[in-house]
Image (cartoon, rainbow, N blue to C red):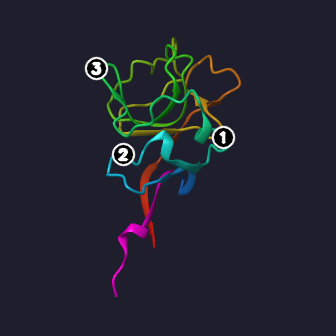
Amino acid sequence: MTIDLSCVCLQVRYSLVRNEVEVGYIVFNGTDTDMMSWFSHSRILHSTWSPGLDTEPNLQPVSITGSCGSSSCRRFLVHESYNFCRFEFFYTFVIDMAFDICNTKTVNWELFDLSSFPVFLYAPGSGRASMGIDRGAYDLGQEADVSSVWVKFAL
């Protein structure tokens, strides 16, 4: 028996788990991608944050490498805006260093413990969330215990 690999469809699911319950996910079309390129806005099929995330026009580039510098490092970034920390809106991201310039309760974010990292953050509702002290009507982002990547092949 031979398998025609041109018929292989691939889906990749990025999941966030808290207290042994999946609290957020994004399913991507992974066909014809490599280990980094599947995680992109144009490949989103559906998610916890649908409708919305898959058609969100103001989404920053969705990226595994994210945004890293001396003041913060955020990976698996699904983020709407970078508006001076207090007004940032996101769906999920991972902080993978012990410092984030926005993590100051008196000025910018509600305080998160970054003494142990990575920290997996997610929007707990069906829409975007904020860490900012001026988040308005948006939910406060929450911390997941586990982040995982699942790959599904279908012939």
Q: Would residue 15 be counted in the magenta stretch?
A: yes
Q: Residue 150: where, in percent of width, then height?
A: 43, 59
Q: Which residue is mark 3?
A: 70
Q: Which residues are magenta?
A: 1-16
Which dot, 2 or 1, sits closer to the camera? Answer: 2
User: Between 128 and 30, which is closer to the camera in this rendering?
Assistant: 30
* Residue at horizontal 61 percent and vertical 33 percent from the top: 128
Lower sequence index among marks 1 and 3: 3
Which residue is label 1 attached to?
125
Q: Secondary structure at mark 1?
A: loop
Q: Amino acid at mark 3?
A: Ser
User: Where is residue 15 drawn, in percent x and y?
Assistant: 49, 52
* Residue 100 inside the magenta-drawn segment: no
- Residue at 36%, 45% in the rendered image: 37
Q: Please, what is the three-letter code of the amino acid marked with disc 1? A: Gly
Question: Label 3 crowding class (10 Å Cα cut-off): few <14, some 14-19, many 20+?
Answer: few
Mark 2 and mark 3: Cα distance apart in space: 25 Å
Q: Is residue 8 above or below residue 20?
A: below
The vertical placement of 151 against 86, above or below, is below
Tags 2 and 1 touching, CB below 8 Å:
no
Amino acid at dot 2:
Ser
Residue 86 location, quadrant: top right
Q: Which residue is mark 2?
A: 37
Residues at marks 2 and 1, CA–CA distance in whole angstroms:
27 Å
Q: Residue at x 38, y 67 (%)?
A: 6
Residue 113 placement (x, y as % from top left) = 43, 31
Taking the spot 59% from the left edge, 18% from the top edge, the residue there is 133
Packing grade of label 1 (10 A; few <14, some 14-19, many >=20) is some
Viewer-closest of 96 and 1: 1
Q: Position of residue 91 (x, y in %)?
A: 55, 36
- Choose between 34 and 126: the one closer to the eye: 34
Instruction: Look at the picture and state if 5 lies above or below 94.
Output: below
